[in-house]
Amino acid sequence: MEKRDVVVYSEDYKKLLNAKACAGKYYEIDERVEEICKEAFKGCDKLEEIVMPKKLKKIDSEAFQGCSSLTKLTLPDSVARIDGLAFCGCSGLTELTLPNSVKSIGDGAFADCSGLEKITVESGNSRYDSRDNCNSIIDKKTNTLIAGCKNSVIPNSVARIDGLAFCGCSGLTELTLPNSVTSIGNCAFGGCSGLTELTLPNSITSIGDYAFAYCSDLSKITSLAEIPPMCGFKVFNGVNKTNCELIVPEGSVAAYTRAEDWNKFSNIRGFSGVEVTVADKTRKIVVE
């Protein structure tokens, strides 16, 4: 183990072990490094730019968690694996380009990156894509959206919204959920405090734990599913269930008043036909 200034490397310099004491705005990682270890830069909230080596293969979990000032990030075309929560809370990032080399991304790798405006996956990546300029990362094999941002437009080929995909995306104001989506993962939209209206397509069958927790401005939820989607633990925790309207198919009101989690809403009413979100309203999730 070798310590250089405030950054600790392995003896062969293939691993960057610890850089938590790094207090500068800029840091260039040694060119021999192949792995940035768990929590290496965690909490380095003064760091604005990081230069990664061309041999880098792996970024471990929580490696850059909480680096809220980080604005410049270029992932080299050698990185194959980005572990869970690796860049969680990097709220200063505005753009992300995923290189062709990345084959594995852990849960919530880019959660709480509330400043993200543009996400691009290079066209030669065999595992992930950002089809139709959707500003998201989608797993090709499962059609699961694993990371999005406030400008994401979900293609109608997506089957699942992964856990933590939009977590902490406080700037999210408008999003279209296509009728291809059947499930929403744990905390997928947790902390999306900008959303005021939510419409769930009739294709949804299950919603994970805390999926819409702390979406504190939600005032209207429309569920188009005749059978209430199965809810996990505290799906709408932090939502004012007294004031928030829950609008469901007219013949399904009784089912929703009995269904777990849905029955916590005080104001459940039915509609006939499909309600259409008014075009001039913002802060909504609508169905195509």
Image (cartoon, rainbow, N blue to C red):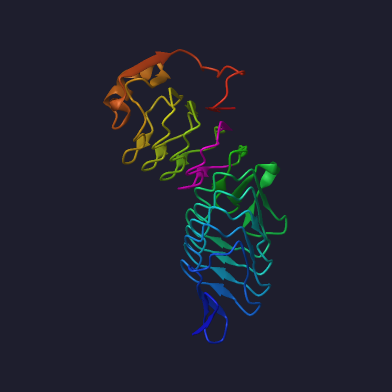
The residue positioned 37% from the left and 30% from the top of the image is 239
Q: Residue at x 39, y 42 (%)?
A: 208
Query: In which quadrant of the rendered view does residue 281 lie?
Result: top right
- Residue 77, percent from left and from top: 69, 66
Residue 267: percent from left, percent from top? 34, 17
- Whole-percent x and y of residue 66? 49, 55
Whether residue 263 is situated above or below residue 80 in the rendered picture = above
Query: How many discs mark residues in the rendered view?
Result: 0
**Residue 185 is drawn in which quadrant?**
top left
256 or 70, which is in the foreground? 70
Task: Confirm whether residue 250 shows in the render.
Answer: no
Residue pictured at 68% horizontal, 72% vertical? 54
- Residue 72 higher or lower than 31, as above or below: above
Give the prevailing secondary structure in the magenta stretch: loop
Q: Taking the image as drawn, is residue 29 in sight?
A: yes
Magenta segment boundaries in residue numbering: 158-176
Q: Is residue 56 or residue 235 the one in the foreground?
A: 56
Instruction: Check the image and name the residue furthest to the bottom.
Output: 11
Name the residue furthest right.
123
Q: x, y (%) of residue 190? A: 43, 40
Q: Is residue 166 magenta?
A: yes
- State whether residue 51 is above or below residue 284: below
In the picture, the quarter occupied by the C terminus is: top right
* Residue 280 occupies quadrant: top right
Q: Is residue 215 left or right of residue 102?
A: left
The question of residue 172 being in magenta is answered with yes
Viewer-side residue, 116 vs 220: 116
